[in-house]
Amino acid sequence: MSVSVDRDQAFLNAIGRVAEEFAAPNADAVDREARFPAETIAGLRAEGALSAFIPTELGGGGVAFETIAAACFELGQRCGASAMVFAMHQIQVATIVRHLDQAPWFESYLRDVVAEQRLIASVTSEVGTGGDMGSSIASVEPAGEGIGRFEKQAPTVSYGAYADDLLTTLRRAPDAEPGDQVCVLTSKDQHTLEPTGSWDPLGMRGTCSPGNVVRAELPLEQVLPTQFARVMNESMVPISHILWSHLWLGISTDAFERARAFVRAAAKRKPGEPLPAAIRLSELMSELSLLRAEVSSGLREFIEASAGDRARLSEMASILRFNNLKIAASEQAPKVCQGALGVCGIVGFKNDTPFSVGRHLRDTMSACLMVANERIHQTNASLLLIAKDV
Amino acid sequence: MIEEIRKIIAEHGRLSVDVAGLAPNADLYHAGMTSHASVNVMLALEDHFDIEFPDRMLKRSVFESISAIESALNELRAEQPVS
């Protein structure tokens, strides 16, 4: 027990160093230039953090899922885009780890991730599906004995140009229904990315997520054996919602801390005088604590469900639970950042003060779009018709 | 019972194939039933058989084939005898 606690603590210490040495000093430039947070990712590679969740049997770090979530929170406090790239990579890793079903190719692939600290991006969204990750248009097409190929129109591919590998959802075969999906892994020497647009967004600018046409040819052993409907419900969706909400909490926490620093500085300048901003800060703390409570209870419930029969995560009550986590956290995080702006006033609005919170606000405004909340509400509305104990 | 289940799926499952031609263990989702359509199938089954699916049964695997639905209904009828 203590070995794993020490291991997890050492990992978090390393994440803390990367956050301070690389993520924080480059955050403004990454945001301004909408460029990939190369320094942070290099730092994470040097610490072996890209394979932290891979089991020790396969050579990985073997850290607990809650420790990965804590790392997203930590990085989120220093650079939202860095935290998002880290979180998305860990979502792909966790998905493969939990569903490889001892497939030899995927076991050997995970060993390569450990040795080479390979960065994995995902291609799950598709033009024409209305934002429904559970259906695909592109399919795995036969391309000779044991070989498949695909071409997928993706409206966004986060850090695709910087990733070593892509995890792509597709219909199982050209005659399969839209919901009969698999995910396939391809390396950069097997796929090409043709950008279909530019990347100049409001926030999360360092994730570098333009649209792309993805084309690839691959041996069929690189198709994950488990059907994607299970992968999605038991892992990809709840894990995405948990890790994203942790980093949104991280960004919001830093915005709150900047507001607090502003109020303390004001109080020191004029000791004893009434300070309206201090009251607003107190109000902001209660908003932050709501976000924190939702994020930590979501994590706890996921750990409990994962410890027993993982199929429980496919039950409607569970799907509703983690959809709600995403909706609540994505709405609350920008609310906290906007509150911090209200506390700091003009020095928060300016981009070059110690109390600037513009980047925080813009980054968290992306949260409600990452799988649009409206789309999630549609799903929930349907599930609520039949679910019993919610 | 199988025929009643087939009728409900035909009405609410919005399959891309004729349900009459489907084997009892054929995957309904692979036959084109979406998650949204499956909720309507569940509601219709509850109404028709006068039962309630508990949360533990409200998951994809329970509704993925005609025979899976049949065994869930049999299990529920054993637990919830019609009064």
Image: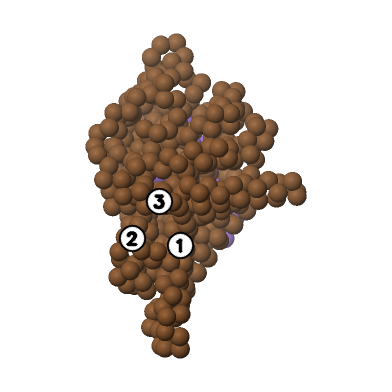
Horizontal placement of A338 versus A97: left or right? Answer: left
| Disc 3 to disc 1, C-alpha distance | 13 Å
| Residue A299 % position (x, y) | 56, 55
Q: Nearer the viewer, mark 3 or mark 1?
A: 3
- At label 3, which amino acid type do we have? Ala
User: Camera-side residue: B77 or A40?
Assistant: A40
Of the image marks 3 and 1, the number of the one nearer the N terminus: 3
Q: Check the image and name the residue furthest to the right.
A: A2
Q: Which mark is residue A27?
A: 3
User: Camera-side residue: A367 or A389?
Assistant: A367
Of the image marks 3 and 2, the number of the one nearer the N terminus: 3
Chain coloured brown in this rendering: A
Q: Chain of mark 1?
A: A
Q: Which residue is mark 1?
A: A254
| Disc 3 to disc 2, C-alpha distance | 12 Å
Q: Which residue is mark 2?
A: A352
Residue at screen point 41% across, 48% down? A26
Q: Residues within 10 Å of mark 2 (few under 14, many from 20)?
A: few
Horizontal placement of A103 versus B31: left or right? Answer: right
